[in-house]
Image: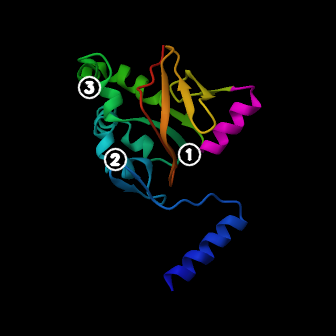
Amino acid sequence: MKATLWSVALAAALSAGTAVAASVDVGGAAMFPEKNIVQNAVNSKDHTTLVAAVKAAGLVSTLEGKGPFTVFAPTNMAFDALPEGTVQNLLKPENKQQLVKVLTYHVVPGRYTKHDLENLIRKHGGEARIKTVEGGMLTFMMNGPQNIQIQDSSGGVADVSTYDVIQKNGVIDVVDRVLLPK
């Protein structure tokens, strides 16, 4: 019975042009499309620093909101690659405004899948720029036929390691570098 219901739901979604994804593992935890960004992110062991930063910045309710948002989620290793003391400094209450700026630079309004980003890159001659919630720009480009890279305003480049983790209120793409605004 479950297989039949799944098949009917999948066929209906596909005929309506809706993207359907089963749960994806991120950081050893299943990410479910019926949950919101925060509900999924808190379970990833690879994103504990990001989750702590989102909580310290007071952005939990925003990322639980309707959206849609596309979040480029740096891993713990990405945060660890920052100069020593950077994360601890950003997490201090007196640096909350700077932390919010860095975190919202990783979020763009709208739901951008890998396919959407690839189409934008092609449409714009190899590079696409998208404005972040923070107000700065991110530049997207292809690195080979399957990988998208993101360049921040400071010239740093992140690779997307996991694409299209569909959420109830958007999409998460995992990145290997913390993106920094000017």
Residue projecting furthest to the front: 144
Cβ atoms under marks 2 and 1 closer than 8 Å: no
Q: Indicate whether residue 124 is drawn in magenta.
A: yes
10 Å neighbourhood of mark 3: few (<14), some, or many (≥20)?
A: some
Q: Is residue 1 above or below residue 141?
A: below
Q: Which residues are magenta?
A: 112-126
Q: Quadrant of residue 175?
A: top left
- Residue wearing tag 2: 27
Pointer 1 or 3: first along the chain? 1
Q: Position of residue 162 (x, y in %)?
A: 47, 43
Which secondary structure type mostly characterizes the magenta part of the structure?
helix
- State the image coordinates of residue 90 (x, y, percent, origin top left): 29, 22
Say which residue appears at 41% left-offset and 26% top-offset: 178
Q: Which mark is residue 38?
A: none
Camera-side residue: 85 or 93?
85
- Name the side, left or right, on which 3 lies relative to 123: left
- Of the numbered discs 3 and 2, the one sitting upstream in the chain is 2
**Which is more foreground, mark 3 or mark 2?**
2
Which residue carries the number 3 mark?
A: 91
Label whose residue precedes the other's in the sequence (2 or 1)? 2
Q: Position of residue 121 (x, y in %)?
A: 69, 31
Label 1 sits on residue: 68
Q: Is residue 117 above or below residue 20?
A: above
Considering the numbered disc 2 on the image, is that residue within a helix, a strand or a loop?
loop
User: Type of residue at label 1?
Assistant: Pro
Q: Is residue 110 left or right of residue 95?
A: right
Q: Amino acid at mark 2?
A: Gly
Q: Is residue 122 magenta?
A: yes
Judged from the image, the secondary structure of the residue bearing numbered disc 3 is loop
Kind of residue at disc 3? Leu
How many angstroms separate mark 3 from mark 2 (CA)? 22 Å
Q: Residues within 10 Å of mark 1 (few under 14, many from 20)?
A: some
